[in-house]
Image: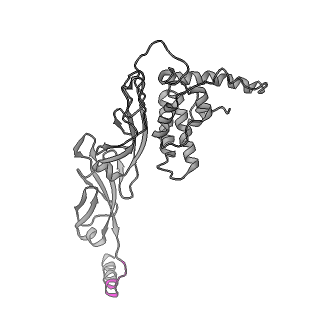
Amino acid sequence: MEYKDYYQILNVPRTATQGDIKKAYRKLARQYHPDNNPGNKQAEAKFKEANEANEVLSDPQKRQKYDTLGSQWSAYQQGGQAGGFDWSQWTTSAYDTNDLNNLNDLFGGSGGFSDFFTQIFGNMGRGGAPRRGSSVRTSQHVPQRGRDYEQPVNISLHDAYKGTTLTLQTPSVPPGPGGAGVGQGGQKIEVKVPAGVKTGAHVRVAGQGERGYEGGAAGDLFLVVTVQPDAHFERDGDDLKTEAPVDLYTLILGGEATIKTLGGNVSLKIPPETQPGRVFRLRGQGMPRLREANQHGDLLVKVQARLPHHLSAEEKKLFEQLAQLRK
């Protein structure tokens, strides 16, 4: 059986904190998520590896067992790998395949966990307790809440401006012992993403995480939002930045220019002799503030000169006269 180096997979040191592990996992999950890499088998494998590594290192009991195994594995390697490594004391004889399938469903059913994971951690539930289907039983049946799941989602800047509703396929969550406290999995649900949401924000979907144990409540599903870059607007907190071409005559003589915003077109007054590159602030035309949708940031507009082209002979003559006057 091949040893899996979960620390190397997440690119974190063995002394990494839970915060470090969570941050590293989110970065890889966003990078290799199947929605961002359609048909890319290599990215799919990386995504699956990151999920598996996070499943172990984010659970204190699994991580403790893994670290102990790792120290013995290192000693075995340093000793010249003589005699073969004894896996028998680490492997489990039974595990609940439903528990493994739950995560597979959540992350697109991308092929399951490795043999290493199922053999070493297959019978460990939340907090290291044996799960239903394990050959190990406890004398006490203590209700345990299911773990929370995270799912990266991508939305456009326009969706973040107006708010949007996402349709998701939830993981198929089987009933726990006693049939109580389970998530309503295996169905399509609609999740509202509020206006003003930023990259890194979490949208909670109650009861759609891991099923509970011994009658415990189900965990929650958290959507981790990434707002995709926009071709016309750059976001800076609740403010937006954009560039607007303005014709030469309006910049010189003054007038009005039509400016595109996420809420629609607005008119901007241009003073005479406005220099290209000048920035105008349109108050209240930026992103809505999260949980305060009636308040908005500002839109910063940098004007750029739009020069005329295909000049006629008469137009060229007039520009030449103007040039002489300026001398």
Q: Is residue 141 above or below residue 289?
A: above
Q: Residue at x 56, y 33 (%)?
A: 12
Figure check: 215 above or below 272: above
Which residue is rendered at x = 43% and y = 37% of the image?
Answer: 172
Report which quarter residue 260 is drawn in: bottom left
Q: Nearer the viewer, residue 2 or 98?
A: 98
List the single residue furthest toward the front: 178
Residue found at x 62% / y 21%:
68
Q: Is 208 drawn above or below residue 270 in the view shown? A: above
x and y, in percent, of residue 31 in the image = 50, 45
Q: Is residue 124 magenta?
A: no
Is residue 315 located in the magenta-colored stretch of the structure?
yes
Position in image of residue 76 (x %, y %): 73, 24
On the rendered structure, is 183 left or right of 139? left
Between 260 and 312, the residue placed more toward the observer is 260
Q: Quadrant of the C terminus?
A: bottom left
Where residue 280 appears, x then y in whole percent?
A: 27, 56
Number of dots carrying numbers:
0
Read off the magenta span: 309-317
Q: Is residue 65 left or right of residue 176?
A: right
